[in-house]
Image (tube, grey):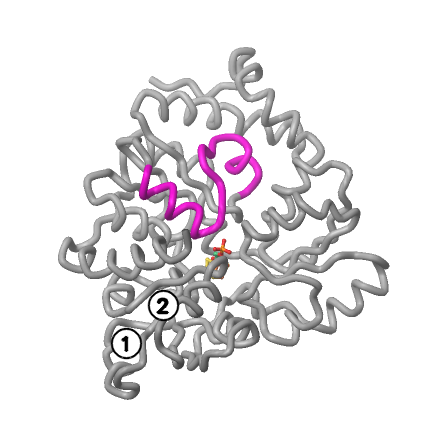
Amino acid sequence: MTNLAYTDAVKAATAPAWNLLKDQYDETYWQTVAPYIAEINRLKKEKNAVVLAHNYMTPDIFHGIADIVGDSLALAREAEKTKADMIIQCGVHFMAETSKILCMDKKVLIPDMKAGCSLAESITAADMRLLRETYPGVPIASYVNTSAEVKAESDVCVTSGNATKIINAMEEDTILMVPDQYLAAYTQTQTKKKILSWKGSCMVHVRFTAEEITAMRVKYPGVVVIAHPECPPDVIAASDFAGSTQQMVDFIDKDKPAKVMLITECSMSDNLAAINPGMELVRPCQLCPHMKKITLPKIYECLLNETGEVLVDPAIADRARKPIQRMLDLSK
Ligand code: 13P
Ligand code: SF4
């Protein structure tokens, strides 16, 4: 039987994560999660499993058990080359599907099958076929935040980190980007090509406003504002830089701003605060309810019992792999 008690051995094994997170977590809370961290890390070794964690995972996951952290692009690249037998995808369902499509021979598990995405839900394969009929000859670039069935109908995939690069690398001058109207609008500001778009949006990033940024600039003079490209255009226009979650990390590593406001999901700031103690983080927090479905107890159950296996029909996977692979090749 597994022991999930907070012992001296658990305390010692989880000390590095606690040292990073002690300003964010209460010690009593830590004593309840540390046994999960220790046990998950033990099980990973036993089962040759790798934890791929998105930047929006809570700090206990991000700093406690993740083997690889990053944005959607980084996680897809890692899935493509991992030597592990099993992938535990700590993120949302489309990310787990992307991993599965890239390594069909591996077991890909997600701790909560209901961790979806408002963007992925906004378009279906039938919508894609209708778009093909409506815009004959126009290539369709799908955001990775889509289902395997939608990817299977696409010419190429993009992420928030490489959309402009991929669009510019395509031969055609007019490209249809689905499903995020705001990523499409942002990409349009970065390219001479004509971008058509769908009407999807991220339920998290759509909640930020330009007025909020203006007010924060008054309250926190000198703050550097970094927005995710899923934000509405006026929010991006009111910011100093726009980029994927990994590009946010890279920007901070390079520029080392003293005061930063990230216009994105809450945990992103929490994770960066832990490793940048000297940096002031202004946090206009918006939670993604899907990302927050992934918790340490669920990860533990999933890894222990190998539940939550993500399966993709091999015929769909073969078709969906082509646009993903094209993206990975073009974004190298
Ligand atoms: P990134 O690829 O920038 O991490 O974005 C994924 C996502 O879901 C943002 O909401
Ligand atoms: Fe989807 Fe938005 Fe959540 Fe990202 S933050 S997973 S785009 S709903």
Question: Is the CB–ligand 2 distance for label 2 below 8 Å?
Answer: no
Residue 1 screen position, x and y as percent: 33, 17
User: Magenta residues?
Assistant: 58-81
Dot 2 amino acid type: Ser
As displayed, is residue 171 above or below residue 5? below
Specify which label sits upstream in the sequence, 2 or 1.
Answer: 1
Dot 1 amino acid type: Met
- Residue in the picture at 45% in, 71% down: 180
Residue 228 screen position, x and y as percent: 58, 61
- Horizontally, is 118 left or right of 259 in the view? left
Question: Is the CB–ligand 2 distance for label 1 below 8 Å?
Answer: no
Examine the image and state in which quarter residue 156 appears: bottom left
Toward the viewer: 123 or 241?
A: 241
Q: Which mark is residue 142?
A: 2
Q: Name the residue under label 1.
A: 128
Q: Which mark is residue 272?
A: none
**Contact between labelled residues 1 and 2, with CB atoms less than 8 Å apart:** yes
- Horizontally, is 137 left or right of 144 in the view? left
